[in-house]
Amino acid sequence: MTRALYHALLLLHPPRFRRRFADEMLCTFDEARLTLGAAPLFADALTSLARQWLLRSPLWRIPAALLGGMLMLLASVLFVPASVTPGAAALATPRHFVVLAGAITVVTISLTLLLCVYWFRFSMRRRA
Amino acid sequence: MTAHSDSDITESDIREPVDSFLPLSAAALHILLSLAGEERHGYGIMQDVAAQTDGKYKLGPGTLYDNLQKLMDHGFVEQARGARRGEDPRRRYYRLTGLGAAVLSADVARLERVVQKARLHLRAGKRGEAT
């Protein structure tokens, strides 16, 4: 059971790290759990999972960009006072403003995603 | 274009790239120390690091392989071979490269200087307390 759980944690690691070290880490887990116990090894695996995704992998930037876009949209809808709404005549109702804010956010997210994809491809090419 | 002969390369030219990797993290230092003596597999490195520190510093597999990945990417460590006959086939052995040995030596020298300075400061502190 503990072994299967540890294996599942290893499968959640970024592909590059998983391909290179997952089998070996499971082998090390099999040997080390007898002397160190399973709990510290699970804590180490969870830390490793966070470290690999947040510090070593560029993929986290995509969900972060999406989250950032969503937060921008939410903030624009909730916190922008009516007095700074652009073109009060053109945007007579809050609904128009939401549509405009949404459109701007969608464009921002798309550009961020495009940049992420180009940056990811560039870094992969450099690694190869 | 200027042609360089071997004699144009000074000692500082070699030391500079090595110094740019210093100071090593505690985990990297202990892993390199462990591999300085002989080639070892992952669990062997974990056991040796625990022995080096009298069990005060225990590396988990996650920390170990994250550091091994970095050390291999920098060219300090390389995979030596696969498992020996009769061993778990998933096992891999690692060894120190020439660059890894140079970086380890440079960090040990740096630590020696730190220890010397620390002793001087502590002695001066004790003298100050006595007077």
Image (spheres, rainbow, N blue to C red):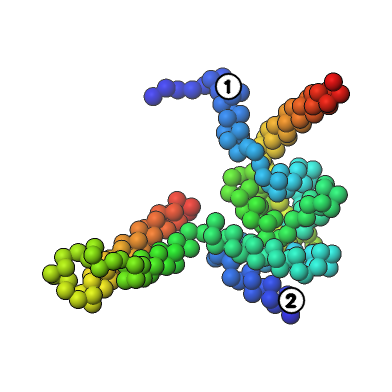
Q: Give the residue at mark 2.
A: A2
B6 sits to left or right of B77: left
Q: Locate the N terminus of chain A and report the quarter of the image it occupies.
A: bottom right
B104 sits to left or right of B56: left
The answer to whether residue A16 is visible is no
Q: Position of residue A127 (x, y in %)?
A: 48, 52
Q: Chain of mark 1?
A: B
Q: Residue at x 54, y 60 (%)?
A: A54
Compared with A121, B100 (above or below) is above
Q: Quadrant of residue A116?
A: bottom left
Q: Residue furthest left?
A: A89
- Identify the disc placed on residue B10: 1
Q: Position of residue A49 (x, y in %)?
A: 61, 64
The answer to whether residue A48 is visible is yes
Q: Residue at x 49, y 22 (%)?
A: B4
Q: Secondary structure at mark 1?
A: loop
